[in-house]
Image: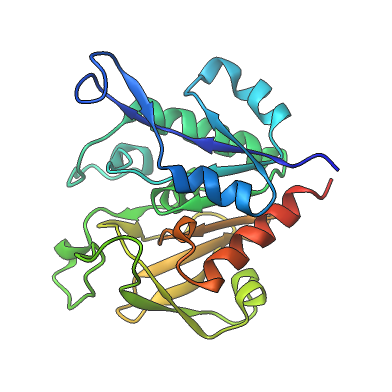
Amino acid sequence: MKKPIIGITLDYEKPGEYSKFPWYAIRKNYLQSIEDVGGFPLPLLHSLENIEDISNIIDGLVITGGNFDINPSLYGDINNNSRDNKNLRTTFELALCKKCLAKNIPIFGICGGEQLINVALGGTLIQDIKSLNLKTLEHEQLSPRNQTSHKVYIEYNTILHKIIRKKFIDVNSAHHQAVDKLGEGVIVSSKAKDGIIESIEGVNYRWCIGVQWHPEFFITRADKLIFLDFLKNCTIK
């Protein structure tokens, strides 16, 4: 049987450090995690001209995170308290996400990828968790990313619960934004103890899950279970 081809979005960097010219970047474990569960990872250049061709090739899509924020104008927020915006990347990811949703191609959003799914479906974001002036957890953990830092509490009767079969799991955390108003057909599948949304699901699609943590590190068994279920659904035609 042919391995499912999983498109993985890349980060975009300006000239400097690695190269004097613009360059793409991705952590190895994004790719390795897909290979480890039986898929073939395909990094995707930001080509708006080839959205249709890309969607014809891939069996599933992983929208990765990155050290940047989605431009708030894309979800109707006139205040800009966000950090660096990478508009070309975001424009590409939104277009590809919507195309894959229309074709019912499984989508897995990780960290910023979860936020992008919500925005693609008409939702909004909390631009900065600390600006809420509430007693929240430290969602930008100081410890290494390959360690857990807090728990998330999983909602019953969600796909995530069916996959993991636990009430809560330990996760890592590397974000300062979060899902706010839910997009159309989006439900919450887990929250942190402070109420911050930690994962979402698009109920109108075959497999559309976003998580706020980084399961590609495979810190816990639960992380790998999510990837395994994603790949299983990418093999169903």
Q: Residue at x 60, y 48 (%)?
A: 34
In the foreground, 146 or 90: 146
Residue 110 on image: x %, y %: 46, 53
Indicate left or right for 170 with 72 as reference: right
Residue 115 position in % (x across, y down): 41, 51
Asked whether 217 or 166 is in front, the reply is: 217
Residue 135 image position (x, y, % from top left): 17, 78
| Quadrant of the image occupied by residue 138 | bottom left
Say if 211 sits above or below 190 in the image. Answer: above
Q: If the image is split into quadrants, where does the N terminus sit?
A: top right
Evaluate whether residue 206 shows in this view: no
Residue 54 shows in the view: yes
Task: Tell me: residue 234, above or below residue 161.
Answer: above
Identify the residue at image location x=39%, y=49%. 112
Give the quarter of the image for residue 185. Answer: bottom right
Residue drawn 29% across the image and 79% down it: 194
Question: Front-most of 116 and 182?
Answer: 116
For the rendered model, the colour scheme is rainbow
Q: What x and y, as percent, mark residue 102?
A: 68, 39
